Amino acid sequence: METEKTVIAEHSNLAAKLLRNPENFIDEVGKRGCTTPVGDVLENGGRLEGVDLTQEPNRFTEDQLIFPVLRSLGHDYRAHPTRYAPRWPDKRDTPDFTLETLPVEVAKRNDVRLFGEVKAPNGT
């Protein structure tokens, strides 16, 4: 079987959906009136605070950018899963999300973990 490369054409539906994700993210920054703190992050290496966004920066980034991108790409995901197999290796915490695109049985059988961690802009 020959492998085909994934190509996002200039006028593809996927490219249009993916472009809307950061546009909507920036629109939400404007709606929340926090363009100055976000500009400080981009221009001066500042750090976003929850008070700027009326939401914790990590969660804001998940809700307004990461999860919409995952949906645009056709992935199923679960935010902050507390139970998932194979287990999340860090027993002290839960991951920010897990992709459920791969059935759990297949993940278990192949010892595959599809977890994601999100960091706020300029966060650690």
Image: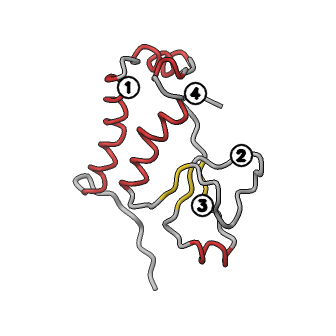
Q: Nearer the viewer, mark 3 or mark 4?
A: 3
Q: Secondary structure at mark 4?
A: loop
Disc 2 and disc 3 in contact, CB within 8 angstroms: no
Mark 4, residue position:
122
Picture coordinates of residue 39 (x, y %)? 44, 18
Mark 1, residue position:
29
Q: Secondary structure at mark 3?
A: loop
Task: Identify the image quadrant of residue 9.
Answer: bottom left
* Amino acid bearing label 4: Asn
* Amino acid bearing label 1: Val
Q: Nearer the viewer, mark 1 or mark 4?
A: 1
| Mark closer to the chain start, 1 or 3 | 1
Q: Is residue 108 placed above or below 119 in the rendered structure?
A: below
* Residue lying at 64% horizontally and 54% vertically, measured from the top left: 82
| Mark closer to the chain start, 1 or 4 | 1
Picture coordinates of residue 70 (x, y %)? 43, 53
Q: In the depicted view, which residue is nearer to us: 43 or 90?
A: 90
Q: Is residue 72 placed above or below 107 in the rendered structure?
A: above
Mark 2, residue position:
93
Badge 2: how crowded within 10 Å, few (<14), some, or many (20+)?
few
| In-image side of 71 versus 93 (left or right) | left
| Mark closer to the chain start, 2 or 1 | 1
* Amino acid bearing label 3: Leu
